[in-house]
Amino acid sequence: MAIKEETFLVTYEKGNYKSGLALEEYNGAFSIVSCEDGKDGKLWPRWCFPQDKDKKPREKALPMKINLGDDKPAAIALLRLMADILDGSIGDNEPCF
């Protein structure tokens, strides 16, 4: 896992504790990862136990992340689309994809 520390954006801060999100590149695919700033100064991903088809949590934890695409252009396009949705450029009647 290669979390890009320079992309860490703090969304919550209390005292010395910071959490937020960062960009990750793994095998050419890009993701947004939920992270915490550790006491050692290193970024650590938050871990979760996703549900399987039977709605029971898996035994193995995985990093909490949102996949953006298999390459940089796809990730950029998705983030631009999200920004357009947030600022109202894309209305309810327009197709998003």
Image: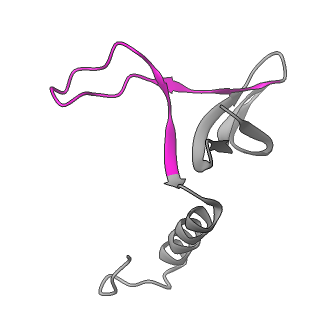
Give x and y (percent) for residue 53.
18, 31
> Was residue 96 drawn as part of the magenta stretch in this picture?
no
Q: Is residue 19 above or below residue 75?
A: above
Of residues 42 and 25, the one nearer the viewer is 25
Of residues 75 and 6, the one nearer the viewer is 75
> Was residue 60 drawn as part of the magenta stretch in this picture?
yes
Give x and y (percent) for residue 27.
61, 42
For the point 44% across and 19% down, which residue is it? Answer: 61
Give x and y (percent) for residue 22.
68, 44
Q: Residue furthest left?
A: 54
Q: Is residue 10 above or below residue 97?
A: above
Query: Where the N terminus falls, by quadrant?
Result: top right
Q: Residue furthest front?
A: 27
Query: Where the C terminus falls, by quadrant?
Result: bottom left
Left or right: residue 44 versus residue 65 is right
Question: What range of the chain is rendered magenta?
Answer: 42-67
